Image (cartoon, helix red, strand yellow):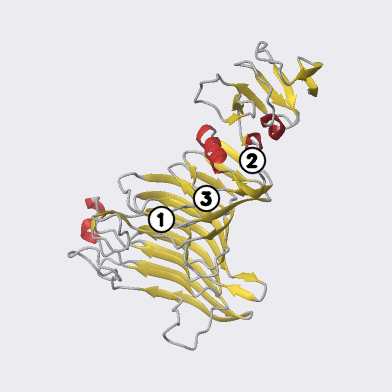
């Protein structure tokens, strides 16, 4: 068997599958058409060889016992991807029709390169970690997630940047709390000693395929600050589209929704610059979300240009019921302060004939649903509470029913 049409130092060669290719002064040799055909090779390569595919991807052959490598060929040769600028994820030969999982490859790319670009295609993955790096989506690129009760789509650590992410996901099991089962997670519900800061998400489009509202689109939890979300679009039956929620150290971590809390941390300095929420139409069925925005014991959070196209509720505030347990003493009097929304448009809000099932479009819940501590401030609405909402517009069937401030 011969591998033909290869170039080595400018000369065409024919390589037998059993022939080792020598290392020659770090000059490149073209050995395969593309990354996928490169991985299929059983040809041995000398350690240190610099090899290239015909479509321009470059690799270095790693030592056989090295743990510092990115890909392995069918011949067991370990390869390092070489990229000095933006890494094109195609270098990892991912499946681009969402039929097989590429989570490991994508996490390896993000852990080793400052910026990773997803080309047009459908990538199946989950539990993707973006840490001090940028994940950028070309027009036509999308990530597909199918999440169980403990998994997430993208987990953003400090310094993470998401550029134009398109996410299509569903939940195969009900999430155990707001830090699981979500498309984009920033922070941790229970690991509150780790601060996550400086996260940016630009132009996210998140499509939820669930038929029931059980999960979250973007969830910001616990010890998080300095987050900016720009021009988000949410489509489908979300329980909450955008959530900012306290996180706590629990006495019983196995009971995240009911365990008493020991210490808490609270998201702050959060900026949401534009969010549009839409129903998902699937044939004769229409699936709508429950809550566009939900805040629980946060402060210094600012949203603007929030548009709700028929979801049940636009804005929900719930009490933290944990105020005296705030880990940072200087923050104890800040919880539920300096919250602003500048611009809310309610487009065709749903009707409900039954008061028992009706949703108020904006609800401030001053009572705790689950007591997590036996002392301290338990009500969100007290002398410290501070919320300002400006420029509310309500429209139905193209007619403006209300335009003005909400005090």
For disc 1, the neighbor class at 10 Å (few under 14, some 14 to 19, many from 20) is many
Residue pushed farthest top? 25
Instruction: Specify which label sits upstream in the sequence, 2 or 3.
Output: 2
Residue 229: percent from the left, percent from the top?
50, 54
Residue 359: percent from the left, percent from the top?
45, 79
Residue 165: percent from the left, percent from the top?
58, 51
Instruction: Specify which label sits upstream in the sequence, 1 or 3.
Output: 1
Q: Residue at x 19, y 64 (%)?
A: 376
Decide: is 202 above or below 318.
Answer: above
Distance CA(mark 2)–CA(mark 1): 28 Å
Could you tell me which quadrant the C terminus lies in?
bottom left
Element at badge 3?
Answer: strand
Q: Is residue 120 left or right of residue 170?
A: right
The front one of 136 and 15 is 15
Decide: is 334 above or below 45.
Answer: below
Mark 1 = which residue?
Answer: 179
Distance CA(mark 2)–CA(mark 3): 24 Å
Q: Nearer the viewer, mark 2 or mark 3?
A: 2
Mark 2 = which residue?
Answer: 94
Residue 342: percent from the left, percent from the top?
47, 65
Q: Nearer the viewer, mark 1 or mark 3?
A: 1
Mark 3 = which residue?
Answer: 201
Quarter of the figure with residue 175: bottom left
Element at badge 1?
Answer: loop
The front one of 319 and 109 is 109
């Amino acid at each position: 068997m011969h591998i033909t049409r290869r170039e080595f130092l400018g000369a065409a060669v024919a390589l037998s599958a059993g022939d080792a290719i020598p290392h020659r002064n770090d000059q490149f040799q073209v050995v395969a058409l593309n990354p996928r055909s490169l991985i299929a090779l059983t040809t041995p390569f000398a350690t240190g060889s610099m090899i290239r595919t015909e479509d321009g991807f470059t690799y270095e052959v790693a030592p056989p016992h090295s743990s510092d490598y990115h890909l392995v060929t069918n011949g067991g040769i370990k390869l390092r991807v070489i990229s000095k600028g933006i890494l094109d994820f195609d270098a990892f030969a991912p499946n681009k029709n969402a039929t097989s999982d590429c989570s490991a490859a994508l996490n390896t790319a993000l852990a080793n390169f400052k910026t990773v670009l997803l080309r047009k295609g459908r990538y199946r993955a989950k539990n993707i970690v973006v840490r001090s790096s940028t994940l950028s989506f070309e027009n036509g690129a999308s990530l597909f997630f199918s999440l169980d009760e403990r998994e997430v789509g993208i987990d953003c650590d400090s310094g993470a940047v998401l550029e134009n992410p398109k996410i299509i996901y569903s939940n195969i099991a009900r999430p155990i709390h707001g830090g699981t089962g979500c498309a984009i997670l920033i922070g941790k519900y229970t690991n509150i000693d780790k601060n996550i800061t400086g996260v940016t998400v630009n132009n996210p489009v998140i499509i939820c395929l669930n038929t029931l509202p059980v999960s979250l689109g973007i969830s910001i939890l616990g010890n998080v600050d300095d987050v900016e979300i720009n021009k988000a679009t949410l489509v489908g039956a979300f329980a909450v589209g955008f959530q900012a929620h306290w996180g706590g150290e629990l006495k019983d971590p196995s009971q995240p929704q009911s365990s008493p809390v020991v210490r808490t941390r609270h998201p702050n300095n959060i900026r949401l610059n534009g969010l549009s929420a839409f129903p998902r139409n699937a044939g004769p069925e229409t699936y709508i979300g429950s809550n566009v925005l939900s805040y629980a014991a946060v402060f210094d959070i600012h949203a603007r240009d929030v548009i709700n196209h028929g979801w049940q509720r636009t804005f929900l505030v719930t009490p933290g019921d944990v105020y005296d347990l705030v880990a940072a003493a200087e923050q104890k009097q800040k919880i539920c302060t300096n919250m602003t929304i500048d611009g809310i448009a309610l487009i065709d809000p749903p009707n409900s004939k039954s008061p028992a099932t009706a949703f108020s479009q904006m609800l401030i819940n001053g009572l705790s649903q689950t007591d997590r501590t036996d002392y301290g401030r338990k009500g969100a609405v007290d002398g410290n509470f501070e919320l300002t909402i400006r420029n509310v517009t309500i429209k139905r069937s193209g007619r403006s029913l209300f335009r003005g401030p909400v005090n």
